Amino acid sequence: MKNLTAFIICLLATCHIAFSQSSPTTVSYNKSDQPALMIELPYTEDVSQGFIVTNLKKTGYEPETKGSLFWKNNKINGYYTFKGVRLQGSNEPVDLYFKVEPKSRKQKDKSIIYLLVNKGSEGFINSGSDYNAAQQFLNGFLEQSAGYKLDLDIKAQENTLKDAQKKLTKLQDDEKSINKKIEQLQSDLKKNQQDQENQQKTIESEQKKLEELKTGKSS
């Protein structure tokens, strides 16, 4: 039984490692087939795009030069292009072309990242130390993107909590305002009741005068 459990754990670990690795593929770029790498992430297209930018910054590359989404304007043939990226293990800077798509129409919570590696005059490459460096960079996406997604979830939850706290503060302020109105209404009610008593006394006094006048007339 212990051997079977150990085998299952080992098998799951192997599957996870296999899933987390990028794989070579061929994509159409500028109407021609080009060598590329691909990896699947268990996150939406927007999350994966944001993670790419965040991970590029860790290499010292600054993809955003104007505005929070300026890099999205730098798109060629459907690929986001990042020029002159120096990756760990590469001999020289390379140009990285990324494309992110939902895994399928029914699986929009997962995405596929395609990466083309360009070396200028050499064009798109599929071997060599620079290509291997790009593949290693992509291989780290699954594990590292989990931390990125967690940070997004934490930030989203912090914003949700902040909104809830703001709503509570507003409700508390409304309560104070309502209590003031209630106090004013109670004061107005008390004054009204006192005015009614005084008015009733006035009526009784005037009624008495009227009766006295009528009595004097009859006598």
Image (tube, helix red, strand yellow):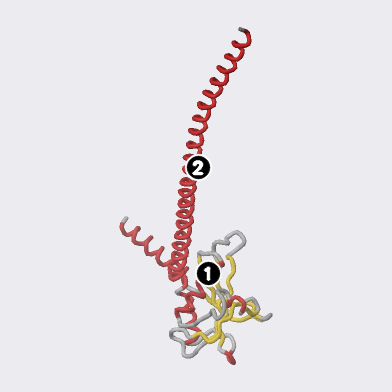
Q: Position of residue 119 (x, y in %)?
A: 55, 89
Q: Position of residue 117 (x, y in %)?
A: 55, 83
Task: Indicate the quadrant containing the N terminus: top left, top right, bottom left or bottom right.
Answer: bottom left
Q: Quadrant of residue 158?
A: bottom left
Residue ID for mark 1:
48
Q: Which residue ends up furthest to the bottom in the rendered image?
A: 121
Q: Residues within 10 Å of mark 2 (few under 14, many from 20)?
A: few
Q: Amino acid at mark 2?
A: Lys
**Vertical comparison of 210 with 103: above or below:** above
Q: Quadrant of residue 219?
A: top right
Q: Amino acid at mark 1?
A: Ser
Left-right relation of 209 to 137: right
User: Between residues 58 and 179, which one lies in front from this camera angle?
Assistant: 179
**Vertical comparison of 171 with 110: above or below:** above
**Tag of residue 181:** 2
Q: Which residue ends up furthest to the left in the rendered image?
A: 2
Q: Which residue ends up furthest to the top in the rendered image?
A: 219
Q: Residue at x 34, y 58 (%)?
A: 5
Q: Position of residue 70 (x, y in %)?
A: 58, 77
The answer to whether residue 46 is visible is: yes
